[in-house]
Amino acid sequence: MPTVPVVDGKGKSQTLELSADVFGGTPRVPLLHQVVVKELAARRTGTHSTLGRSDVSGGGRKPWKQKGTGRARQGSIRATQWKGGGKPFGPRPRKYDKRLPTQMRRAALREAVAAKLGAGELSVVDSLGVVDAKTKTLATRLKALGVAGQPTLLVVAEIAEGLMRAARNVAWLSLETPSHVSVYQLIRSERVVFEKAALLALEESLRKTGARREIAGAGAVVARARAPRGTRGGESAGSTDVRGGGSAGAMSGPPQLKTKPRRTRS
């Protein structure tokens, strides 16, 4: 079971035990890479655009006649080889969003936190204790935790107005809540500082879906095992056959069609 020290306001340290099912996994680099690519692609607006040959104004007539001038034949001064002409194969507005299963995104978030735990780059405080909107107070508190100057992610349970104003003046600090923390932020930051309540909230949110699915799956298996034998396959025991009008077990084969006797020539 992974453990992490929790530092209180007086500098005393206690040990917090985390769930091995949530933060005890081994980081998988290909999975983390896929999620980071998805998160960075989602940031792109995709509004880039260029003017093609049909979008540039002008060039409606032929610059010179086809033959007899000694020059290369041209059809328009807005062709791609002309100065001021259209851009060939230029970028067009598009979406860069990538779809990824929810289970993969949640697993990557669990493994990113586990990687920071294993590397010793994750710190936990009982409470940050920054009430006033003073950057100096926040920097002093982080310096006491051994954080100063390197890219740092600070995850708090709730972002207060004073804390937000104090953190926005620190260029190397990012402030997030457990519901908005991303895998890219965790991997990019050299140090990660969690409030105890924020880390427990993140652990609970990452555990909730898996436990719910296990309970739902177990309930479905139990319900199927308790169902009567005739209803397990999707039919009720007293279902009737529409073709024959009787019960399903009364007919062993398809209904027989009535045919008229064939007339023969005499």
Image: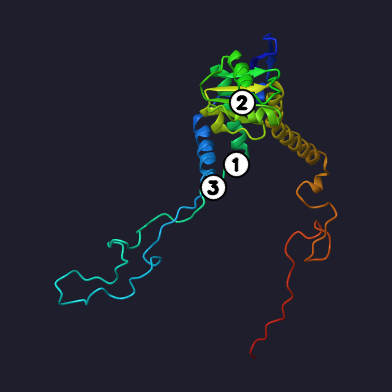
Q: Is residue 226 left or right of residue 9?
A: right
Which residue in the protein does label 2 denote?
154
Residue 204's x, y, as percent? 72, 28
Tag of residue 51: none
Which residue in the protein does label 1 denote?
101
Q: Residues within 10 Å of mark 1 (few under 14, many from 20)?
A: few
Count of labels shown?
3
Image quarter of residue 165 = top right
Which residue in the protein does label 3 denote?
97
How far separated are the C-alphas under marks 1 and 2? Answer: 27 Å
User: Can I make out residue 196 in this image?
Assistant: yes
Q: Label 1's element?
A: loop
Kindly give the residue lying farthest to the top in the view shown.
12
How far separated are the C-alphas under marks 1 and 3? Answer: 13 Å
Q: Are marks 1 and 3 in contact (CB under 8 Å)?
A: no
Residue 30's x, y, as percent? 49, 33
Residue 257's x, y, as percent? 73, 72
Residue type beneath disc 2: Leu
How far separated are the C-alphas under marks 3 and 2? Answer: 27 Å
Upstream in the sequence, badge 3 or badge 2?
3
Residue occupying the point 65% across, 18% down: 124
Task: Choose between 174 and 101: the one closer to the eye.
Answer: 174
